[in-house]
Image (tube, rainbow, N blue to C red):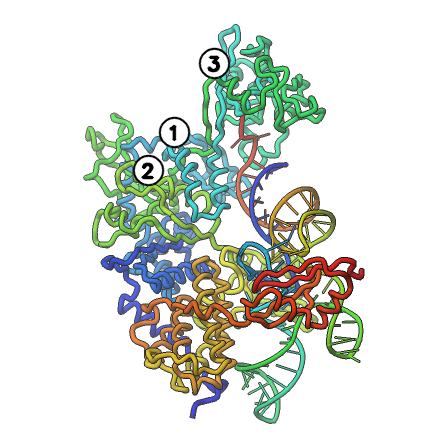
Amino acid sequence: MSPDISEIAAYDFASAEAKWQNFWLKNRSFSTDCTSSNPKYYVLEMFMYPSGKVHIGHVRNYTIGDIFARFKRARGFKVLHPVGWDAFGLPAENAALKQNYHPKDWTYKNIAVMKSQILSLGFSYDWEREFATCDEKYYAFQQKIFLAFYKNGLVYRKKSEVNWDPVDNCVLANEQVVDGRGWRSGAVVEKRSVEQWFLKITDFADELLTELDKLEGWPEKVKTMQRNWIGKSEGCSIVFKNSAEESVTVFSTRPETIFGATFLAISPDHELAKKLALNNEEIKLFVEEFRKGSVAREFLDKQEKLGIDTGIVMDHPLLGKKLPVYIANFVLMDYGTGAIFATPAHDERDYEFAMKYGLPVERVIQAKHGFSSDLPFLDDGVLANSDFLNGLGVIEARKIVIDKLVQMKIGKRETFFKLRDWGVSRQRYWGCPIPVAHCPECGIVPLAEKDLPVLLPSDVDFSNSGNPLDSHPTWKHIKCPVCGASAVRETDTLDTFVDSSWYFLRFCLNNSNSDDLLSHEDIDYWMQVDQYIGGVEHAILHLLYARFFTKALADCGFVSVREPFKNLFTQGMVCNATYSRGNGEWLFPEEVRKNKDGDFEVIATGEKAIVGRFEKMSKSKKNVVDPDVIIKKHGADALRIFVISDTPPDKDFPWSDDGLEGCGRFVNRVWRLFLFLESKGVCAKLCSEELKVESLSVSVMELYAGFQRIIKNVTDAIENRHMNKVVAYIRDSVNSIYLLLDEVENNRTIFSVIIRDLIKMLAPIAPHICEEAWERLGFSKLASENSWPTYDENYLKVSVVSLPIQVNGKLRGTIEIDPEEEEDAVFEKALRLDGVRNAVAQGTLQKKIFIRGRIVNFVIANAEK
RNA sequence: GCCCCUGUGGCGGAACUGGUAGACGCGGCAGACUCAAAAUCUGUUGUUCGCAAGGACGUGCUGGUUCGAUUCCGGCCAGGGGCACCA
């Protein structure tokens, strides 16, 4: 006697999940297969910073990745799906300071905690390739890379401005500057010029830009952001001279407007400005004032345009007239040449400045009907008042004027980029030491291969101010590798973005014991990353650096690949409601409840709680939920289903406890279905029996046909990354099966086939319950080792379709017909419907539209209004 | 300011190349089971008029193209994101 489906006990997710997680680990179920001849597929989620606990955002990111990995395995790919830790960085040092932990201990302790959390979610990782960027072996190899870059001219030193804490005597990261003050000392932060290490990412500006067009698997949005960031502009540099043998080189992307130039402007940081400041009190004041103001970048952006006349004049190279030279705060030194010629009539900034200082405006571009009275005029037009350019279009004029200036030997076609070289020096302990020596005799000397690796000392004191490596009593003192004189080590460490710029290449290493972390052969074997998944917040920096690194490593001979990520998917953030007290203090969601009036109140005190908007989950706003708690209460499968259901994965995900509970219910509903079918004799064995479709009842036949459609829909949806639809389709199919439970007894074979394919489809999303059911129903191997279900095309064709009948575009009824039925017969049937006939009778029939299998539309005139 | 994206029930969201708007889920309502509740199963749920049959309205607003528009085109509004004096 089989049980009623409602009497089946709830699914014991806790023991099943533990069982399968142990099984997978013990059997190395997801170790990378590097031997088969199947096509390869490399799935990678952006690796994690070991901050202490996994948060829901990670869960969503890794669930999406895991579904891909499992799906691709089922579709016959050999999949590389590795996991690791982005483990260097500032928080470890903060923890060292606050909690008296060594950064290393803190980091590895966090990794252990987070690893156990990740394991409890059942992701199909190859743990044999796991590493942390703070592992000695990893950062030691990174030093080799640094030296290779050095050798290839991709590394250099230059002075650069940093946030300097004058009390702690150290450099601060931007995040450590709070309201213009150092976070620890509270001292007002200064801008200081310090010698720093740079990587020449600008060497690759053009390639980074042009290759973007070929990245078809990247979101357009990310590509646009990178394009803007690289910021290429093509134009012409022009030398202006005067009789005093002085000269200024300006850059313009619109050299065709040169006849409208009425003054020159240079940056307060320009050499000429600095020179003039030496002898002119007024200019000195202006330049100094500017420097003060420039400390806060945001302030600068909103600043009023200010300038000062230098008294110097330059000759206009084509007109011979004299142009005054101004120092102007809106001219940036670090773009172009730090100087411009100003054409107020056709440039907003120039216009604003000219108005303020009463400078002349000369119009040189005409709209269709003469000069526009609206100034500045920025639209396209035809050149005027411009000598040999008159009558030409802008593009043509540009070409001709540049040719002319080049011919006069005062102009040069040039391209400038917004992209700056990458400053990688960090004056702190918990990072990869830069393998360089400073010798009083030889200057800067890269360490020799034999002096590597430079390991971090473990006995460090964080109570001193400044970089602990710098204040370490012995660590930095060495002999110069060239002359043997007493020298010191570089005490800067590398930006952690360097660590994350090549980790995806390290994962390719098939022999984890190898010392050559960039095995050319293995990288050729696995790269590119076929599917990279992560947050859009890395759209620029990480993704640009990783692209640059890959190209630089290729130039240094380490790899052949030049673009690391074939397909990129950026998932949305997980958001949750926010609650606060009247005084603005944030509250945890569990601290509030809805009272009987529907308002929210603080449970402890009963005071009214303010409901804020949905915002990204963050500790500071206290709108976080703990994955551990959820897994304990609802299980990993329910959580995995929840984070991908309802919302498309690239959109922000609104957390809801009710939604999560619904997923828990669904898991149970599926479980009861499995057990019910089992009790009715549905099992693996029956799947091999021949299907006798003809003998099926209409409803079971329809279920089977509908299920073929579900398989197609689920397959397409996963391929297209519409995970929310995958869940919807699977739920739909479960619902349909529930409605036919009475039929199971007489149709065991077909239900065996259906349930087999259902488990296969659900397995990438909810692997634990699927393995458990798979085993109970007597299937061999693992559900995750089985092939993806196929569908029978024949059942996708329907024999009856419900055809909508419209009159003047309005639905008046539907008829059930064979989709292949002929036009006239369909019209006739349609007109048998009262609603249709009556509507048509309201006027005279003008036209009949018939789209086979889609729609019928009667168009009538004089329809009643 | 410039660039990009988004706008569909009470909510998250579906809708093939223009062809029955609202799949699936959440929430709500009702029924079954139960002494009762929970759980479960089933039904129902855009708004509105109507006892009903059946109508009217409805995809941010507004024009247009079309037999037919959530879908294509123009203008506007709102929200989100990126860049921000880049010559």
State the image coordinates of residue A820 (x, y, percent, origin top left): 54, 67
* Chain letter of the residue beneath label 2 in the structure image: A
Residue A158 numbered tag: 1
Tell me how far mark 1 sits from mark 2, CA to CA: 20 Å
* Tag 2 residue: A552
State the image coordinates of residue B51 (x, y, percent, origin top left): 77, 79
As helix, strand or loop, the secondary structure at mark 3 comes to: loop
Tell me how far mark 1 sits from mark 3, CA to CA: 29 Å
Does A301 appear above or below A669? Answer: above
A519 vs B15, left or right, is left
Q: Residue furthest top?
A: A243
State the image coordinates of residue A348 (x, y, percent, origin top left): 63, 28
Which badge, 1 or 2, is on the more N-terminal residue? 1
A544 vs A388, left or right, is left
The residue under the point 77% across, 62% down is: A843
A412 vs A815, left or right, is left
Does A796 appear above or below A9? Answer: above
As helix, strand or loop, the secondary structure at mark 2 comes to: helix
Count residues near mark 3 (Cα–Cα under 10 Å), then give few for <14, some for 14-19, many for 20+. Answer: some
Quadrant of the drawing holding the N terminus of chain A: bottom left
The residue under the point 49% across, 74% down is: A666
Count residues near mark 2 (Cα–Cα under 10 Å), then give few for <14, some for 14-19, many for 20+. Answer: many
Residue A410 numbered tag: 3
Q: Label 3 is placed on what type of residue? A: Ile
The residue under the point 50% across, 85% down is: A6
Does A70 appear above or below A164? Answer: below
